Image (tube, rainbow, N blue to C red):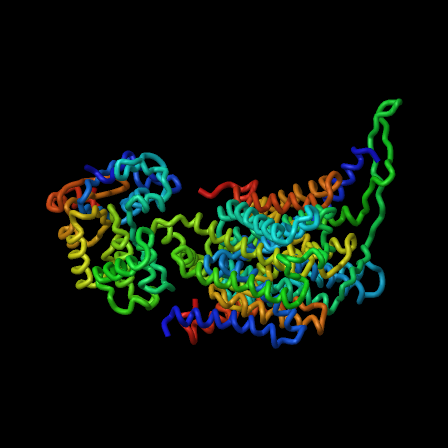
Amino acid sequence: MSLLCTEGLSKHFAGLSAVAEVDFDLPEGQVRALIGPNGAGKTTLVGMICGRLRADAGRVVFDGRDVTGMAAHRRIRRGMAYTFQITSVFGRLPVHENVALAARRRLAGPQVDAAVREALDRVGLTEDPDRPAGDLSYGHQRLLELAMGLVQAPRLLILDEPTQGLSDSEIARFTGLVRALAGQVTVLLIEHNMHVVMQVADAVTVMNQGAILAEGTPAEIHDNPAVQAAYLGTN
Amino acid sequence: MEIGPYIMLASLEGAVTAAVLALTACGLSLVFGVMRVVNIAHGEFFMLGAVIAWWVAQGIAGHPALGFAAALVVAPVVVGAVAVAADVTILRHLDYDPERTIVATIGLLYIIQQLTLMTYGPEARPVQAPFSTRIALPWLEHGPEGWQVIWPWGLGTTTYKLAVIGAAVAVLLGVWALMARTRIGLLMRATQMDREMALAFAIPVERVYALVFGLGAGLAALAAVLIVPIQQAHYLMGGDPLLLSFVVVIIGGLGSLPGTVLAAVLIGLSDGIISVFFSPTLAKILATLLVGLVLVFRPQGLFGVRAP
Amino acid sequence: MSRRARILALHGGLLAVLFAAQFVLPAYHHGNLARIMVLASYALGYNLLFGYTGLLSLGHALFFAAGMYGMALSMQHLEAAPAPALLAGLAAGIAVSALLGLLALRTAGVAFMIVTLMFAQAGHLTILYFGEWTRGDEGFVIAATRRVLWGIDLADPVSRYFAAWGLFAVCLLSTLWLVRRPFGKVLIAIRENEERVRMLGYDPFLHKLGALVVSGTMSAAAGAVYGLLFGYAGATFASVQYSIFPLLWVLLGGAGTVLGPFVGTLFMFYLIDLASGVTTAYMLIAGVVLVALTLFAPQGLMGEVRRRLWGWLP
């Protein structure tokens, strides 16, 4: 049973085709990695899925319902969570409040505090939750983004390059976290770090020049000559 | 007077309004276009131009044309210098942050206006026109003996009003030439298009900004000197030109000079004609609502093209 | 003391001091303070939108005037009693702010400022245009004999002071309550990063509309009460100047602080009061303060207090 699928999804920017006729299918419970060279259209595709960008053509179906014309916040309310590629936390608000804002959409009262603490624990940000989020290091802000995503208890968690700027130990923690989510939450992960992809993904989709180039298990993708060509730029 | 000659008279008066408005609005548009600064104090630069014109004309003896000619030079230069000073001491230190500069220019508005009240006083004072010969205008009427030329009483204009229109056209052409044909115009356009890129190409962006702010204010002051023989100089006279300039700049498309001039002609002419039929207050209500609604529903202006 | 206790002590303390001041102040300052409390309520309304939601309106005089004229016109022309007249003022405030919000909130930033400025200007001109009913700039007086609410004579300085205090207390406490509610916290988050709020599943438009209507209604309440307590309605209260005043008060006192609006109104009122004794050009002070604040102290007085002393200040 697929949680998310797109049909013929396309987007142009100033006449250039960024994403062209993409049919994408994501079964419930899967951890899917979306990879591809820079400019392949990954963030654009994900932007159309979660509603940050309006599609020029095609449709997005989430949980059996056409959400193509739906505003971003409504899609989020239906169970998507999105973490930004460029960290976009509330810099002047306390760390705790950042996560609480995300939690309060579905919880109220003392439940919020408990959920916030749990989410911060899971990503390993336990130190001084009262300081402004802007004071955190870049890597910690990424972890905070992740906590804001987790605390929403989403059905589909979209992570846009979550390990960028993390240290090795933080990456190890992240992969452990995503693996623990496997089966409970459907995850769509844009990722450059192939090591992370190999460790956490059930399946991999490769994009190149706005289209899907290949799909398969991590091992299949690893051995796919077309994928290697795309990455090496020899096609 | 019948309706036909009446409308012709209104259009002539409207053309004078349009000419002065085009100059004032061009200044506002230039500042917004290049610096992305909405200058709420623009009307006060206009007022300051008129007041300085009165002072200069007052101080120079002899034929009124002498004083007027001096004012034509002195007022825009002094007002431009005031604006440059404001840019350097205030706007630059706000990093041209759009919202904070608006608040600062509101402060500037009160400072200029109230200082004028303290020094120049609350009176309205006229400046004599350098020349002002009355020209009667003919009108065609279909009488019992076929078409005939008549000279309706009250239908006419003055040489000075025609000169105002001519001067405005000349100055606007000058501004266009400055922007399109000179190196400094090129620098302005480059800064307008991409501030960061301009900085990277070592364009002295700060100096360009100061110049543009001074130039914008100078244009308003020049417009005021031209109009002050027809109206009078008063410390509260800046409100209407500010409002009308906003109308013109927003309807013409923010930052677009040709759109601004086109809109100025349209608004100036229709203002003259509308006030024949409606009260000026109603005309102003319609104008302000129009600006608001254009910004809400067509932010690129009525004549602008939507950015891709 | 816990954070919550400190907040209650501080704000409750201010209200208690203001309540008690009534018994010690000389008549002149007593009258001034009544006026300041009503105007500070207006500033509190403005602060909700500007300080907490991050929307800089240049047209709040429209709401103040909607309240004032909603109240005054229904007393003048419909022979309404003060209580229904106040309700009419509030209703006018709600209607006008909802309508303005539906239009103006389609824009953001500088365009929002200009749109609010223009619509408020249109409102001011409309009041002038219907001079037959509103008496334009000259305005009209509401006779003292008619300003009796539930048997309380509002023209009497003592009851006027209590009425002003009551309005201020309601506005202050509801602001305090609102900004600590989830709704208020979403407003603050919108101020900080609207796109992120949307991607957390909140509808920014609805929240901003809510903020604008609450802000406009509070401003209208202040306008209605001002007209009723001081017995006068005039077009000046709808002019640009009365849109700039709350911005000035809030900037001076500290945008996004609950106490800021009162502190700013208090200081500015006395500053202008002093200046107008010296010169007719007293608005010069307003101009200088505006420029100085944007240049040197964008946080305002209470913002500085929060930054340096009391980080817990709401």
Camera sees residue C298: no
Q: Quadrant of residue B82?
A: bottom right
Which quadrant is home to the N terminus of chain C? bottom left
> Quick one: which residue is furthest to the front in this view?
C151
Between residues B232 and B168, which one lies in front from this camera angle? B232
Quarter of the image for the C terminus of chain C: give it: bottom left
Residue B181 location (% of width, % of height): 57, 51
Q: Residue at the spot x=48%, y=63% of the render?
A: C173
Q: Position of residue B294 (x, y in %)?
A: 56, 43
**Residue C224 drawn at (x, y percent):** 61, 55
Work out whether residue B134 or residue C271 is closer to the camera in this orientation and state it.
C271
Residue at position x 65%, y 61% from top?
C154
Is residue B262 shown left or right of residue C3? Answer: right
Q: Nearer the viewer, residue A183 or B99?
A: A183
Residue B2: % across, % down: 82, 33
Q: Is residue B291 left or right of residue A85?
A: right
- Residue C308 vertical position relative to residue A181 in the rendered view, above or below: below
Q: Is residue C36 above or below residue A72?
A: below
Q: Is residue A71 left or right of residue B208?
A: left
Residue at 47 percent of width and 64 percent of height? C256
Q: How many badges with numbers are in the image? A: 0
Task: Name the residue at the right extreme.
Answer: B145
| Residue C235 visible in image | yes
Say above or below: C275 vs B149.
Answer: below
Q: Residue placed at 22% from the left, 51% from the top?
A: A191
